[in-house]
Amino acid sequence: MLKLGFLGFIVSFLVPIFVGFALGDYLNCSYKFLIAFLVVVILSIMGFSGVFSSLLHYMLPRKRACEGVAVHEDTDNNNENKKIRILEAADPTVKISSDVVCGENNCNSNSSDNHGSGSLVKKEEKEEASFMALGDANSTDIDEDLHSRQLAVYGRETMRRLFASNILVSGMQGLGAEIAKNLILAGVKSVTLHDEGVVELWDLSSNFIFSEDDVGKNRALASLQKLQELNNAVVVRALTTNLTKEQLSDFQAVVFTDISFEKAIEFNDYCHNHQPPIAFIKTEVRGLFGSVFCDFGPEFTIVDVDGEEPHTGIIASISNDNPALVSCVDDERLEFQDGDLVVFSEVHGMTELNDGKPRKIKNARAYSFTLEEDTTNYGAYVKGGIVTQVKQPKVLNFKPLREALTEPGDFLLSDFSKFDRPPLLHLAFQALDKFVSELGRFPVAGSEEDAQKLISIVTNVNESLGDGRQEDINPKLLRHFAFGAKAVLNPMAAMFGGIVGQEVVKACSGKFHPLFQFFYFDSVESLPTEPVDSIDFRPLNSRYDAQISVFGSKLQKKLEDAKVFIVGSGALGCEFLKNVALMGVSCGNEGKLTITDDDVIEKSNLSRQFLFRDWNIGQAKSTVAASAATSINPRFNIEALQNRVGPETENVFDDTFWENLSVVINALDNVNARLYVDQRCLYFQKPLLESGTLGAKCNTQMVIPHLTENYGASRDPPEKQAPMCTVHSFPHNIDHCLTWARSEFEGLLEKTPAEVNAYLSNPNEYSTAMINAGDAQARDNLERVLECLENERCETFQDCITWARLKFEDYFANRVKQLIYTFPEDAATSTGAPFWSAPKRFPRPLQFSAADLSHLHFVMAGSILRAETFGIPIPDWVKNPKKMAEAVDKVMVPEFQPKKDVKIVTDEKATSISTGSIDDSAVIAELIMKLKQCQKNLAPEFRMKPIQFEKDDDTNFHMDLIAGLANMRARNYSIPEVDKLKAKFIAGRIIPAIATSTAMATGLVCLELYKVLDGGHKVEDYRNTFANLALPLFSIAEPLPPKVIKHENLSWTVWDRWILKGNPTLRELIQWLKEKGLNAYSISCGSCLLYNSMFPRHKDRMDKKLVDLAREVAKVDLPTYRRHLDVVVACEDDEDNDVDIPQVSIYFG
């Protein structure tokens, strides 16, 4: 019945007897033995039926829900088999325990229901079903608080597929650790870590899991605990013995990071021919070189090629032609491409197109396309219509590695300046495999003999290709390849860990286009510009030996002595800290790293900000991240601050701070902060390494003094904002509805209560301010405050229900009735065109029904939040639909009559929906008088509680109300509704984010960090990157140089700043510029003019110190830490042509 062993059997037998006796005593019954016997029988039956075992599942001591496995390896002195017990997750869909007995060459499960001789993952459908039936049907539910940013990228269906996926990662050096980390954060069902080797000091250059205490331990076992901490919902296992191909059948995807081609071909053949196929990935990082090979089977179906939302358009006209021309409104450019399939809906007149049949288009333009269909005999188009792209699945036919090695097809390119590089690296990695198989070791760093042997093998392999051989095998490149072949560098591991982690997600879900099939990359530009002596590559018996074998010990010293500033400690910041700690940056006696972030840790951070744990929620990000980074490398010299970087903290990040920096790394999530840091780096001429992510996309930009343009030199166009009248009266998509809903939420629950408190705190001052303003906005504020305290003041929870019910009527019935009364369905514009033409949608009022749970839920959420603002207790029955319906039925809803004189804003250029009037001041005075009377009815201490919108707390009803507002409004306008999660993405302005793109971006940036700290690299050595892991697409190119301005024999760029020392006078500055052939006619400080040649009285200032003029005229407050003053000088040459000169800094300290 139960696998409890002898002790368990005794317990299960004796407990019912004691229960029987206790029950007999309680009932004062003389038949105690009979009752005990009956209890034994009943519990035995329950045990056989699975109920008792289910109860034991909850009664017995166990780990936290969904915690991963613990692996223990017991080795006795006798040369007997080693026994590993794997405790499964406490998840009712997984067996509680299974024994795996591992001999020298195989693993045999003690379970009687093996899937194979080496079964590692049990798949017992009947047992899963019975556990699910016992009330844990939500075991596969998605924790939306944790995975919200990831859900925004993948969607629920992809996440569910991930939750059911078992992954093998073989090879737990740096690359394997990075891949495993990303997959565990993503939330797959299980990750099995395989490695037969032991931790070496060498591994500490690239693996963030290992410490010096782990040296000598098995790599997989040493990785287990720390990787498990990343996500307790993922089962993490360790496998330390020789892997057989039969064991691969337990996994949906297998990844090998350290395997010979011979073994890889054997495993890949098995995976390729398995039914269903097992996704196979072989990846390597060798110094500054990396490779990936993917094989997802003979026929792999991609469900969603790019992950983008289907494109849509609003139809303006359709011709009765063959082929038909479809024109769309110019509200937004169409994103269709020739050959796309589309479907039509809501078309009036030409209703034949509303049949839901996908139709192919061609001649796609910005606002039109041609339909490959004869519409001559269709009904004439009248109005309306939506056209929506239909995303088609795609099937890929992968070759197995055996074939792909000789017929690789097209390589995925990343850097077009290295067009010929992938075919050469294809040979180089094969040659390295031959080298290792022949000599049993990797080439030695700095060994010319080993390098020449590798080059010889490449030459032989190349010659054997006949007509397909490479013309130039680039011996210099191969020499670098040989020298670093043994090393796994952390930046490379981070980059490839992101790429490969994403490929595993694709293999398990069908989401996004897989890498097909080879990808090669190198960053030889990261090597020092000066030649490195072979002695410099020798190991120093330090944790950085692998890195030293690639770059030499001199660059290592530069890394350790660097002074680095990382701005931000979120997802990018965590990855950067891990990377630089492993690289040894700021780990020397002279080095220091400063990190700052004013944010605290939230639950939603844990799915990608991997240095944080659930027990850190609420703590300062920078402090926790710094502590975690120090545990990665105890020599890390790091200071954590909680300051926002901006003008207000220039006393913290002062001139001395900036001047002492070696480099700045941005890990920010907003443009304004990036622009500020960019200006600081320009000013102090410091390198800035910039990066960002958006879902599966990432970009990096190198900002190098005097070599590249700065971050602010080019900007993305601002996002298009919907006109205010569209949002408030004429929405035509769900984004408009959610924008309106968020605005209403903030107005009702935050701004109005705050205005009420502002008035009650100081009525006279508030009233005076409104009178002085005297505009429509002041009138609106007073009207809202009066309405809140008089007509809509709530004293009981029933009042709150009444308020919410009447809001429903106002928003979704009365306002719509007024709108269609003012603009009936047949209304026309001043030009005679139909008023309700695309993109406008004609609305319909809603009729409230307590039987409609969405209506009831809106009232519930609204009443709860209204009660919160008034401090009214919320009754326990509020979530009971029946009782809520009864309470709503008590509300008296007045009849609504539309008015004739209501003005509704239709001007798309209007910035406010408030309409001013000539008597605003009189109305304001009257409102203030009414407020004074209303205040007399309030307790002196009465205050409201404004509610600030918080999207990441699903228990606070904020998103319930916003989703309700948006969906009811969408229902008015026949716009498709969205669930609460999608509403959260849009209204909460959630930026989609996943760990894989973050890891890749930071890896790429750290490859550039080598160049920055080495110094001496040219602009052509640096790389900017844009990548989209969904496609996948890699676009790597040199940064653009800064714009050069020339004047006579002078030239300067945005990087230059002219400096005058010695506390000069105004005359001395003008004379200094005159000597450069520049005539200064205007000098300003901030927004104040210090000098202008057109003002005669300004000549009296000529002999005054500029710093004194700034204090006297511009009223500049120069703090004690400031040693200079910046002025802007407008100049012209001798021919009166304006010349833009650099900013001028006047040093006075």
Image (tube, rainbow, N blue to C red):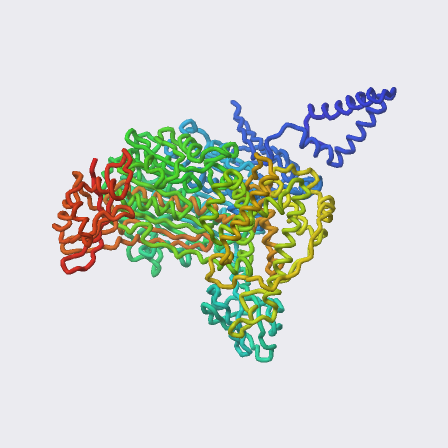
For the residue pair 1065 and 218, the one nearer the viewer reads as: 1065
| Outermost residue toward the right in this view | 30
- Left or right: 449 in relation to 863: left
For the residue pair 1051 and 159, the one nearer the viewer reads as: 1051
| Residue 462 appears in the picture as rendered | no
Q: In which quarter of the image is the C terminus?
A: top left
Q: In this view, does 382 lie above or below 939?
A: below
State which quadrant residue 388 falls in.
bottom right
Q: In this view, does 54 lie above or below 769?
A: above
| Image coords of residue 426 (percent x, y) | 37, 52
Q: Is residue 117 above or below residue 841?
A: above
**Count of labels in the image:** 0
- Left or right: 746 in relation to 475: right
For the residue pair 247 and 422, the one nearer the viewer reads as: 422
Which residue shows up at 30% across the image and 33% down it? 560
| Outermost residue toward the left in this view | 1075
Which residue shows up at 62% across the image and 30% down it? 62
| Image coords of residue 112 (percent x, y) | 66, 37
Q: In which quarter of the image is the N terminus?
A: top right
Q: In this view, does 295 lie above or below 601?
A: below
| Image coords of residue 266 (percent x, y) | 49, 47
State which quadrant residue 549 falls in.
top left
For the residue pair 301 and 673, the one nearer the viewer reads as: 673
| Image coords of residue 395 (percent x, y) | 53, 59
| Residue 674 appears in the picture as rendered | yes
